[in-house]
Amino acid sequence: GGLAGDDLHAIVILFARDEEERVRCVGEHDALLARCPGVRTLSHLDLAATAPFEYDHDHFGYRDPISQPQMKGSGEVLIPGAGGALAPGEFILGYPDEEGLVANQPTPEVLSRNGSYMAYRRLEEHVGVFRDYLKQNAEGAEGQELLAAKFMGRWRSGAPLVLAPEHDDPELGADPMRNNDFDYGTMDPHGYACPLGSHARRLNPRDTEPNPNRRRMIRRSGTYGPPLPEGVADDGVERGVGMFLICASLVRQFEFAQNVWINDSAFKDLGNEHDPICGTQDGTMDFKIPKRPIRKVHKGLPAFTTLRGGAYFFLPGLAALRYLTTLEN
């Protein structure tokens, strides 16, 4: 499903602790593939990009990940501001969700129970374009960092604008017990700190949307491609993030977020505006920054990212994998 062609049937995700283990795992995978007539590799992506900072981040320099949903029964320590632990059925098939319902599942049950659906996205990040836009539309280094934060909804350190509206607070950004502990409805209803259309506010509207927990997804990602050094012009090398979004309903969760929160101009009645970071941009869209006495409108936003690939997958549980090995055809 998704953007994939008819010749794509499966995705293999290999995890390794170091380069030696990665080489071994890839070799074992290739050897296994060679014993499977009619099966071939269509493409591959190495998500082991070297990070120039001491924390995980994307190529724009933003700490990632930060805001992740938590699941009841997982044993995770509850993070303030995460919205509370959610029912397993929001992410795993065969269990009740937040409304007590069990999502539609593939049959037989042994194939679906403990499985999930996953949307994969390969998103190229145009770092040079992003930096150039900041330089052309904001004064000085501080102004550029503030505009970048307005686009994202957080400073690069991870500090949210709602809690640090004027200046970055790296200590806050690095503290998982504080950097998510806020809401929008009571703390910033009009978007004076964090614009209503910012990336973070669109993807997790928190208390400003009805039933936001019905749209949450587990997200894992990694960067690919070399970092672009500061002060260096765009070198034409592709770099970006590979994202894996896990949920129980691709329609209710992933496609809703993609079509309504990210790319719907009616979001918060903003009009001619999409997500400034990952929304569809053709050079005609705006970005509004609420400000007293007069708001600031940035017109003609370029595309800071480009979707380079994506597909929908079913992730089987262990019992399903064992079941599949018993099938003859």
Image (tube, grey):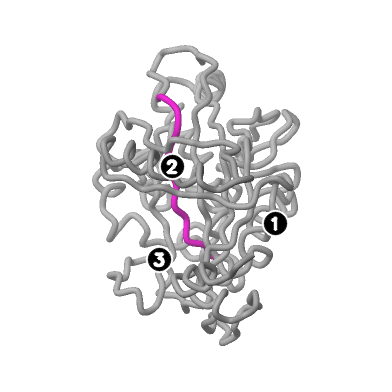
Q: Quadrant of the N terminus?
A: bottom right
Residue matched to label 3: 82
The answer to whether residue 149 is left or right of residue 314 is left
Residue 30 in the image: x percent, y percent? 45, 40
Residue matched to label 1: 260
Contact (Cβ within 8 Å) of mark 2 with mark 1: no
Residue matched to label 2: 31
Which picture quadrant has residue 5? top right
Element on which disc 2 rests: helix
**Stretch of the chain drawn in magenta:** 216-226
Alpha carbons under labels 2 and 3: distance apart: 43 Å
Check residue 125 for magenta coloring: no
Pick whichever of labels 2 and 3 is earlier in the sequence.
Answer: 2
Check residue 221 for magenta coloring: yes
Element on which disc 1 rests: helix
Residue 41 in the image: x percent, y percent? 57, 39
Q: Nearer the viewer, residue 112 or 85?
A: 112
Residue 200 in the image: x percent, y percent? 51, 50
- The amino acid type of the residue labelled 1 equals Val
Q: Is residue 294 visible?
A: no
Q: Residue at (48%, 12%) from the top-left corner?
A: 233
Pick whichever of labels 1 and 3 is earlier in the sequence.
Answer: 3
